[in-house]
Image: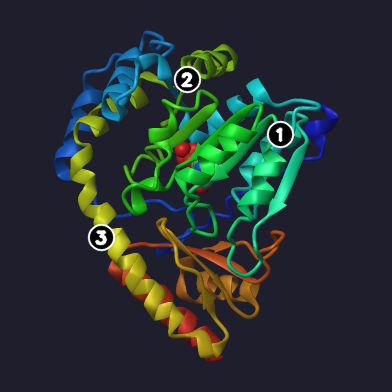
């Protein structure tokens, strides 16, 4: 094995069967019926004997029209993950450091390790998870690639477009704003409006979260034509299949119908945040979030996570081993009954009671 690959473990989402799955930041609300019908119809009329159109022209056209950019400013991938990999493949490598604002999405470092790209980790404030923006801008001057995740996974907080613009000004290479969860944030939070002024900015989006297409795998990036061309040069030509392309087009046509569950999740997030915040005298801390999940810290988190799974059949994400996230769990916002169930179960666990 390549030495850089031999040190890696296979990605483990620690999934197991459970009644309530709040572990992977999916949108578990019913899909809008008309959107689902359109997906089914699109798949039914799509032949599978021919290879896909490699650059997914029709889909890119639709994404470009939505975002008000040119088709040459859009690229699609097999989930946002593929685009993250391709970004580091194209712009990373030895002596071409990647700056990340930790704790953040672990996949960046995984890909950087595999692609022999040095990582500069700038730590967020351990209490608020805010970023020291001046320090980050200074560090960006030494990086070939900067990834700023907004809202950040798993801490839920935003980075402002003003800060992203400063990073673009400082970094001699590429700045990626990973906006996988942006649909759940306050209006005006996206950095996409900066694309015109900053040709080294790339904005990553996905249909996995708000648009309920995690299983279909469709992510996309917006960037200048030069950056898109670099990403196109390194990509595997047929990574996005015909069925995913057809279904994603149907989702885009019906995208307004998804607003209902997005709004619902935002309201549920605030309700669940209040319910969890009320457990503070039992040692629980919860951070506000602009995404579809909440980060909590509680005593004996790994044990609590195992009890949630084994006694309550509720799956949440255990982050307690990750640097900077001691005793932290990440809870996806689900349907109201699911959110009530996880709050009740955590209350029971904190009270030291058993089911
Ligand atoms: N970025 C962030 C911050 C994420 O949390 C995720 C999903 N876990 C992704 C990108 C990629 O999502 P997908 O590959 O499903 O598009």
Quarter of the rendering occupied by the N terminus: top right
Please give the name of the residue rendered at 16% of the width and 44% of the height, measured from the top-left corner.
33
User: Is residue 354 among the parts visible in the rendering?
Assistant: no
Q: Are marks 2 and 3 in contact (CB under 8 Å)?
A: no
Front tag of 2 and 3: 2
Residue 243, compared with residue 162, is above or below; it is above
Name the residue tied to disc 3. Answer: 264
Q: Earlier in the sequence, mark 2 or mark 3?
A: 2
Q: In the rendered view, tell whether residue 244 sits above or below residue 207.
A: above
Q: Is residue 346 left or right of residue 43?
A: right
Q: Tell me where residue 334 sits by quadrant.
A: bottom left
Q: Name the residue that disc number 1 marks.
A: 143
> Which mark is in front, 1 or 3?
1
Q: Residue at x 70, y 50 (%)?
A: 122
Seen from the viewer's position, the closer of residues 143 and 14 is: 143
Q: Horizontal and vertical percent for residue 141?
A: 70, 35
**In this view, which residue lies farthest toward the right?**
3
x%, y% of residue 167? 59, 38
**Cα–Cα gap, marks 1 and 3:** 39 Å
Q: What residue sits 62% from the left and 70% below the top?
A: 127
Q: Is mark 3 within 8 Å of ligand 1?
A: no
Number of other residues with Cα within 10 Å of mark 1, as a class: few under 14, some 14 to 19, many 20 or more: many
Residue that badge 2 annotates: 224
Residue 213 is situated, as x and y percent measured from the top left of the image, at: 36, 39
The residue at the point 47 percent across, 34 percent down is: 204
C-alpha distance separating marks 2 and 3:
34 Å
Disc on the earlier residue, 1 or 2 = 1
SS type, badge 3: helix
Whole-percent x and y of residue 343? 42, 77
Dot 1: what SS?
A: loop
């Amino acid at each position: 094995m390549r030495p850089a690959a031999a040190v890696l473990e296979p990605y483990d989402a620690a999934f197991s069967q459970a009644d309530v799955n709040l572990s992977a930041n999916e949108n578990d609300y019913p899909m809008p019926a008309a959107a689902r019908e359109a997906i089914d119809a699109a798949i039914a009329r799509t032949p599978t004997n021919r290879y896909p159109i490699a650059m997914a022209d029709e889909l890119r056209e639709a994404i470009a029209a939505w975002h008000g950019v040119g088709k040459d400013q859009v690229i699609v991938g097999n989930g946002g993950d593929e685009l993250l990999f391709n970004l580091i493949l194209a712009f990373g490598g030895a002596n071409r450091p990647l700056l990340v604002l930790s704790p953040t999405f672990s996949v960046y470092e995984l890909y950087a390790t595999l692609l022999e790209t040095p990582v500069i980790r700038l730590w967020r404030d351990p209490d608020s998870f805010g970023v020291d923006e001046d320090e980050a801008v200074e560090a960006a001057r030494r990086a070939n690639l900067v990834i700023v995740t907004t809202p950040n996974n798993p801490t839920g907080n935003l980075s402002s477009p003003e800060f992203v613009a400063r990073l673009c000004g400082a970094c001699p290479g590429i700045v990626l704003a990973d906006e996988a969860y942006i649909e759940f944030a306050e209006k005006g939070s996206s950095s996409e409006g900066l694309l015109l002024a900053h040709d080294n900015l790339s904005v990553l989006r996905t249909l996995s979260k708000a648009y309920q297409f995690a299983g279909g795998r469709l992510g996309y990036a917006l960037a200048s034509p030069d950056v898109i061309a670099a990403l196109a040069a390194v990509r595997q030509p047929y990574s996005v299949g015909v069925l995913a392309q057809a279904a994603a087009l149907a989702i885009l046509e019906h995208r307004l119908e998804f607003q209902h569950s997005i709004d619902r999740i935002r309201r549920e997030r605030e309700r669940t945040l209040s319910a969890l915040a009320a457990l503070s005298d039992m040692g629980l801390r919860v951070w506000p979030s602009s995404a579809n999940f909440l980060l909590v810290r509680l005593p004996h988190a790994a044990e609590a996570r195992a009890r949630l799974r084994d006694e309550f059949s509720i799956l949440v994400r255990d982050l307690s081993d990750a640097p900077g996230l001691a005793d932290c769990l990440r809870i996806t916002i689900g349907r109201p009954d699911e959110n009530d169930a996880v709050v009740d179960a955590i209350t029971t666990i904190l009270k030291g009671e058993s089911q």
